[in-house]
Amino acid sequence: MAVKSKAVIFKKVPTDYPVPGEHLETIETDKDVNNIALGPDEVLLKVLFISLDPYLRGKMRAETTQSYNLSFVIGEPFYSHAIGEVVKSNHAEFKVGDKVVGILTWETYSVLKGPALKTAIIVPDIEGIPLSNWIGVLGMPGMTAFVGLHKIGNPKAGETIFISAASGAVGQLAGQLAKILGLRVVGSAGDDAKVQYLINELKFDAFNYKTTDTNEALTKFCPQGIDIYFENVGGKTLDIVLNHANNFARFIACGMISQYNTQHPEGVHNLMYIVRKRIRFEGFIVSDDWLLYWPRFVKEIPELIKNGQIKYKEDITEGLEKAPEAFVGLLRGKNFGKAIVKV
Amino acid sequence: MAVKSKAVIFKKVPTDYPVPGEHLETIETDKDVNNIALGPDEVLLKVLFISLDPYLRGKMRAETTQSYNLSFVIGEPFYSHAIGEVVKSNHAEFKVGDKVVGILTWETYSVLKGPALKTAIIVPDIEGIPLSNWIGVLGMPGMTAFVGLHKIGNPKAGETIFISAASGAVGQLAGQLAKILGLRVVGSAGDDAKVQYLINELKFDAFNYKTTDTNEALTKFCPQGIDIYFENVGGKTLDIVLNHANNFARFIACGMISQYNTQHPEGVHNLMYIVRKRIRFEGFIVSDDWLLYWPRFVKEIPELIKNGQIKYKEDITEGLEKAPEAFVGLLRGKNFGKAIVKV
């Protein structure tokens, strides 16, 4: 009996927020999952969990703008970090039944092949770690928090770090790591439930940037100024943080989600503070430094999760057909915690 | 016979470009230069050359805005790096006839005292170096070029550096140093004579940003993108450079003169490139690193000047009474080379 694989397809380049159905859509493909031909070294995976990440919005473009990553191809599936179980394998390292984390297409069944084979790994078998963590706190977002904080942040006990989108996939871990290192941690988020989570569960100082004036909140929560800014949002918030930054502050340029869904990014006006305050504002892409930081990361973080020092909230949507909506929800800040689709 | 000292006085905080007479003015003071009382360790100098620097605009403010330097005081003289000759001294290190470079008030006769004593030095006696060079290519602007390029720029042969305000006090030296190190050097300036100087004398690629589209010029002159941006102007130029920057580019945040004379700095929109391209955008203040770089600087640069490898254009205005006009001219880009007043 034929079992058709489903896929989330890139349909059209959006200029504003993407619309499910118009710009991306879950369809039933022609592929019969019982009859997928594998080339040499290729591996067929039943996809279990898919990571929804803000940077994917940048791949929904026409192939004209240069960027650090390739664009999605119209008519072809989305792809991102995901976890699958091997159901068929021509590769010596991957055996049927193995759980694998790597870059996979957004399909119910995905073929691991080409360059994606090189970065895919078998999920380490560590007791007490939920499988989905390997695309969240122990995956790319977790590594992003870890690399950004250590490579650019240069955190020192007693300093103040401000984290925008602090309840998000990256912000949660960045803040908790900073707290363990003895920093004062202040976070912002876009609704009261997230703010309560940051305050009550993660023990950050936190505020709702939609209902509180950011300038007043930073004045209150950062009485000694801001030494490190974990920049996830850009725009107005960045302008205000420049105003509150201390001399020699480090700005970890991780993302600017407030600016992704517009043709006309907001202007930032206070850049002269970069000179006056000798700020270092530095971008990074986690894949550049992955190999360097991974051994330390995988040694430290699972342990912190198991002993309860690191908590991590996931927002899991069930069903591949809901992935387009969940992805757009992420771009609009509707997710609460790391956005994941359980296929 | 009484000889009255003249002084350039800060009269009023400007909101836009300062106006000579309204915001700063040269006046005759009550001080009789033959009867100036000196305290212990104080030194009376006949002022010879005064350095006009863009950053001084930032000191023409009410004492409310934090910055890396104090504001000028209403009713009191301007001060900046300057060269004077000792005419009276209570200090063992400074003897009558010595030429001294340090922070001096803009007066015909200035008393060196307090903290300024600690950073003042007797001008090194090096043959073939014009005295005025010690507030230009061999002074604060020269050190700014040197420290910015080495500390933040991390220049490598074969790379491309773009320098805005390239014929200015800092830009001239930064570009020539980069050229000696084997970089492709591209500069912009605001009139054709400056551009011709950059092309013919300094051998940069150069364009007039007022008559040429900056985006087109950078496309033409930086075919391999921009690895280092020596940022002196801010605003629109910065936005365009972000667009032309290579991965891992370094932006030396030295100044943003296009934004100093307005209450409403222009918005910069392309900051997302800092993430995508892993740009490091870093500010610095030369005084922080002065002691570290000075020995190397003073060993290397005078030699390069004497053997003709470094040229340096100065724009010398004669007479302290012309200083207000010359300073405002600097802010408007009317100077051609390092702006100096010969007192």
Image (cartoon, coloured by chain):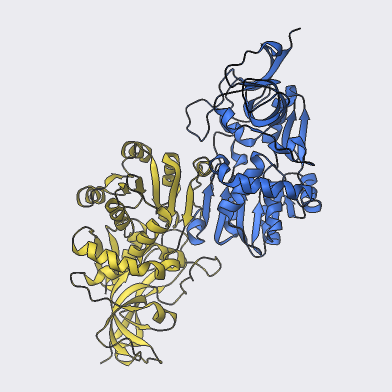
Chain colours: A blue, B yellow
What residue appears at the point 37 percent right and 51 percent down from the top-left corner?
B155
Residue B200 % position (x, y): 20, 49
Work out whether A305 lies above or below B318: above
Residue B86 % position (x, y): 28, 85
A158 or A61: nearer the eye? A158
Work out whether A79 lies above or below A145: above
Work out whether B223 lies above or below B159: above
Horizontal side, residue B320 vs residue B147: left or right: left
Residue A75 % position (x, y): 59, 17
* Quadrant, the C terminus of chain B: bottom left
- On the question of residue A210 being in view, the answer is no
Horizontal side, residue A46 vs residue B72: left or right: right
* Quadrant, the N terminus of chain B: bottom left
B120 or A259: nearer the eye? B120
Quadrant location of residue A39? Answer: top right
Residue A219 % position (x, y): 67, 60
What residue appears at the point 35 percent right and 47 percent down from the top-left corner?
B161
- Report how many numbered discs are placed on residues in the image: 0
B60 or A99: nearer the eye? A99
What residue appears at the point 33 percent right and 66 percent down from the top-left corner?
B296
B331 or B136: nearer the eye? B136
